[in-house]
Amino acid sequence: MVTIYDIAKEMNISPSTVSRALSGSPLVSEKTRTLVKEQAKKMGYQVNMVARQLRNQSSNMIALVSLQENWSWFTDELANGVENEIHKAGYEMVVLHGTHDNREIITICENMRFAGIIVASTELGQGQGYSNDVVPVVYVNRIVKDCYSILPDDENSIRQAMEYLRKAGHKEIGFINGPDRSMHSKLRYNAFVARMKEYQYALKPCWMGSCDWTVDASYKVTAGILAQKKLPTALLAFNDQMCIGIYRAINDKGLQVGKDISVVGIDNADFSKWMVPALTTVSFPIYEMGREAAGKLLQRIAGAECEKETVVEGKLFVRESVRIIR
């Protein structure tokens, strides 16, 4: 990486002169400023934002701390939502990877004088938050007492899917849930049971199951459901990825998705509209959660009052995987 010392050596001037020229200091002549900037551009120099904010005691940088080891579709969509919102206010974003014990990385962000921090988790979780008067923090998909947070509306996602199936004429509905350790799974299961009872539909354990979020696991659970003498007319899945295994199990049984058995997912993953038939699903509002988190953080940076907790609803996307029962 090119530094101000490299530029100074190339131009045979002092590093302090280069620094002043690049920062627009009036202590350097217009001619020198122009020559230094031209040389910096020629050499591919980039401003060290961290060093600048440490010197200036202020920052226009916002940290998005992802509580998972690897980049994922969740991080990508969330980052897009955050970035698009903060750019309007003149802020920049940096993405960092943390752990579920996020105190250390938040302390690092404080020391680097970030303007604000967004802590995001792929899996809904609870835990001790970190709230202070130095750097504002907003949590995404984390239930944190006495802290600012953005949460998805799992119950509403199930309600939308079930209401659509009800209007389509389905009464015999099965449910393939995520793993029992997941808070999302518990919320969605409870919402499914509540809707079945509200509609006075028979709740049949043989049409229900839970598994990890994998294609192989959902295939096995679906195959078990399809081994029953009486089959459901529709299956609601915890997420879209599971639906790949569900589709395959239905096809291997000699049945057709959207004709013999209808399927609804949750996520609105990119591939869902390319499945055959195209999958009806309720979106997991990751992008919108990113925007809400950024908006709440900007309010806190400005010292404005805002709600502690914001719940974001998904949207139903009707495609071809549900048969209308006349």
Image (cartoon, grey):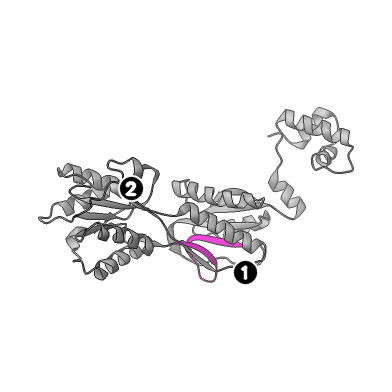
Q: Residue at x 74, y 36 (%)?
A: 3
**55 or 26, nearer to the observer:** 26
- Verify whether residue 21 appears in magenta: no
Tell me if residue 181 can be seen: no
Q: Secondary structure at mark 2?
A: helix
Q: Residues within 10 Å of mark 2 (few under 14, many from 20)?
A: many
> Which quadrant holds the N terminus?
top right
Amino acid type, mark 2: Gln
Q: Which mark is residue 66?
A: none
Up the image or down, 191 lies above or below 121; here it is below
Q: Secondary structure at mark 1?
A: loop
**252 or 320, nearer to the observer:** 320
The x, y position of residue 187, in whole percent, is: 35, 65
Tell me if residue 61 can be seen: yes
Residue 157 located left or right of residue 2: left
The x, y position of residue 310, in whole percent, is: 50, 65
Amino acid type, mark 1: Glu
Residue 152 located left or right of residue 174: right
The x, y position of residue 21, in whole percent, is: 83, 39
Q: Residues within 10 Å of mark 1 (few under 14, many from 20)?
A: few
What predominant SS class does the magenta segment belong to? strand
Q: Which residue is mark 1?
A: 305
Q: What segment carries the magenta color?
A: 136-152
Q: Residue at x 29, y 48 (%)?
A: 243
Residue 232 located left or right of residue 49: left
- Verify whether residue 145 appears in magenta: yes
- CB under 8 Å between discs 2 and 1: no
Q: Earlier in the sequence, mark 2 or mark 1?
A: 2
Q: Farthest residue in the front direction?
A: 326
Q: Which mark is residue 241?
A: 2
Viewer-nearest of discs 2 and 1: 1
